[in-house]
Amino acid sequence: MSNPLVMQGMTLPDVDVWSDRVTVALGQNPSAFAGPGTNTYLIGTGKERLLLDPGEGRETYLPILEDGMRAAGCEKISGVVLTHGHPDHIGGVRSVLDRLGRVPVWKFPYAPFDAGYDDLEMRPLADGDKVETEGATLRGLHTPGHAPDHLCFILEEEGSLFSGDNVLGVGTTIIPSTSGDLGAYMASLGRLLDEEPTAIYPAHGPKIEDGPGKIREYIAHRHEREAQILAEVQKGPRDPITMVRVIYAAYPENLHGPACQSVSQHLMKLEKEGRVARTGAHADDPVRATWSAT
Ligand SMILES: [Zn+2]
């Protein structure tokens, strides 16, 4: 469950007002990977607000959301907007609609994640599409890499960014070895930097005041990891877990599994660039393959 190194004393209030237009209610799902839990956002200035990411679906979340609505001064939800279809973001959608009424649910379509939510009549959002409510205009940015269906949103009235899982207030983004794509993720970070957001509201962790600074830090971190992985491979053929034990030596072992996925993502990116190749009995599986420099 929660990991002290990742959490590092990270706690956030259940409800907090982060700007005139943005109130956060915590999803009540803390973990090593979700930090203090999913930030669910009430956005706008009127009696009806948009809800960005309704969390995982924990029972304890609904009263917290209602506290958030009182703190924000709103009475209703005008629509639900989803950054992507991972369970800690989409999982709460049905219970929120059951409690607060059926409203439109906006999302970038992606069949493998959307199956099971057919009854919600989700409305498709594409890159550049806008969702509006009183006092807030959200402009979608299709930013795949962490997930194929990932959208970030610019809050145009503030020039701020809802970064979903692409940039976090605590820890680093996991690029899953199955549906993730590190090359696409790096391109997405570049796109977010081009927007020069004033501030970032991440899906996990506290508000980030220096948006561009944080995105640059994320890009630099990935470049540094890539250099470390290349240095390991250049010592001779080896598999991801062997590299993880060196590169992530300071991290607790329960993070070595996800770290293996991250390392294999770097290796697949380098493979596309023709800088490494895989061999060995498990060459079909990037996490278990033996990798060597070309
Ligand atoms: Zn996610």
Image (cartoon, rainbow, N blue to C red):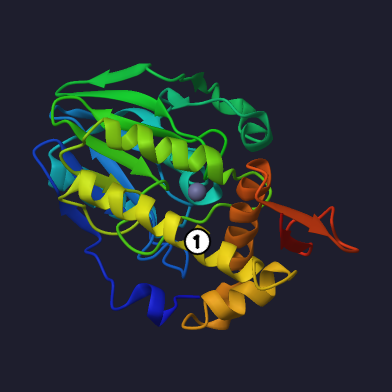
- Position of 139 with respect to 85 (left or right) is left
Residue 227: where, in percent of width, then height?
50, 61
Q: Tag 1: Cα neighbours inside 10 Å, few (<14), some, or many (≥20)?
A: few
Q: Residue furthest top?
A: 129
**Could you tell me which secondary element the residue under label 1 belongs to?**
helix
Would you place residue 237 above or below residue 82 in this image?
below
- Residue 56 x %, y %: 48, 52
State the residue at coordinates (33%, 63%): 170
Residue at 46% from the left image edge and 20% from the top image edge: 125
Check the picture and name the quadrant holding the C terminus.
Answer: bottom right
Q: What is the count of numbered marks? A: 1
Say left or right for 276 vs 137.
right
Q: Is mark 1 within 8 Å of ligand 1?
A: no
Q: Position of residue 93 (x, y in %)?
A: 47, 39
In the image, is residue 115 above or below residue 63? above
Q: Which is more toward the observer, 174 or 214?
A: 214
Residue 258, compared with residue 219, is above or below; it is below
The amino acid type found where label 1 is placed reads Ala
Res. 83 visible in picture? no
Relative to the observer, which residue lies in front, 59 or 13? 13
Would residue 197 be found to the left or right of residue 53 on screen? left
Q: Is residue 246 visible?
A: yes
Name the residue beneath numbered marker 1: 227
Q: Position of residue 214 (x, y in %)?
A: 26, 52
From the viewer's perspective, tell me whether residue 164 is left or right of residue 144: left
